[in-house]
Amino acid sequence: MSISPRITQRLMTESSLASMQAGLGRVARTQEQLTTGRVINRPSDSPSGTNAAMQLRQQITQNAQFLRNAGDGLARLGTADTVLTSMMDSVRRARDLTLQGASTGSMGPQAREALAMEVQQIRDGLLSQANSTHLGMPLFGGTTTGKVAYVKDGGTGVVTYAGDANPVNRRIGPDDNVRVDITGPEIFGPAGDDLFDVLADISAKLTSDPGSLGSELDRLDAAMSRMTTSLADVGSRFNRLEAGMRINRDAELSLQDSLSQVENVDMARAMVDLQMNEVAYQAALGATARVLQPSLLDFLR
């Protein structure tokens, strides 16, 4: 024979209060979700959802860093492209002057001296551009901490490379590193036969030995070819960074959408839940007031 539990006034009171407290808790939780706009306000709300949200936030942070890296790389390569394009115009002008000095037999010493001086001015201008900086660092100096990539000896006029050969890389994806710099020797040639050496020799031979300018033209053409190749290399890496930035922006939108689905509350559904919980709570209050028996004082009246 089964024994039924004894239902007392105290048991009914405690059970009713517990049920009403639970109903009031559901109302409070729904109100909190509507206030914050999030379905997860503490880890206990959804341990699995909290874990997913933490992983998504980590990916969002990582992706934001990739975007910053790509932006820095684009700025650096964009500056390099602008500087090199301008330098190419100056080198072409130097070539024209060299051709003029090599092909004009009737040109006098003063005219040749003027050509030599202009070539020297072009060389000085190119040296200044070769020492362009990005964020305070030499643009074509690798990772050097010095102020300039090239140094000119005040006495001899010899130009030497003061940077290093270390590449500057930027990570724009989990497995995607892009080099965002190009060093002076890669652009202008090796020491002893770089663009500045060629222009110095041209300037000297315009006045001393114009007949040998043909070989200097070949050296200058080789230097221009290196610069053209460098420009193409910079452009290809610039395009790669742009593509990487587009991919990261698309990934950012996708990650934010995934995080929203995990954390954010469905406002329409939450409003309906709030109304239902409020109705249920009010009904529980009314039912409890009717079910609980009067107290002893009510009988003594």
Image: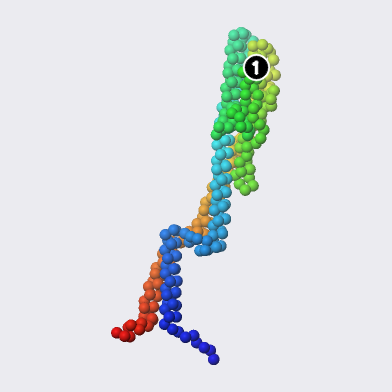
Query: In the image, is 28 to the left or to the right of 200?
Result: left
Residue extending farthest left: 301
Residue extending farthest bottom: 1
Where residue 275 appears, x then y in whole percent? Answer: 39, 68
Of 116 and 100, nearer the camera is: 116
Image quarter of residue 245: top right
Q: Residue at x 52, y 51 (%)?
A: 253
Using a 10 Å C-alpha cutoff, classify the residue at mark 1 as few (fewer than 14 neighbours), some (14 to 19) or many (20 or more): few
Q: Residue at x 68, y 12 (%)?
A: 209
Quarter of the image that includes the C terminus: bottom left
Q: Residue at x 36, y 78 (%)?
A: 289
Number of numbered discs present?
1
Image quarter of residue 102: top right
- Residue 241 versus residue 291 in the image, above or below: above
Where residue 162 appears, x then y in whole percent? Answer: 64, 27
Is label 1 in a helix, a strand or a loop? loop
Q: Residue at x 50, y 59 (%)?
A: 263
Query: Which residue has dot 1 on it?
Result: 156
Image quarter of residue 76: top right
Quarter of the image that includes the N terminus: bottom right
Query: In the image, is 245 to the left or to the right of 103?
Result: left
- Residue 287 versus residue 119 in the image, above or below: below
Is residue 232 visible to the viewer in this orientation of the structure?
A: no
Q: What amino acid type is highlighted by mark number 1?
A: Thr
Is residue 24 visible to the viewer in this orientation of the structure?
A: yes
Of 11 and 125, nearer the camera is: 11
Of 93 and 22, nearer the camera is: 22
Where residue 293 appears, x then y in whole percent? Answer: 37, 83
- Residue 60 versus residue 134 in the image, above or below: below
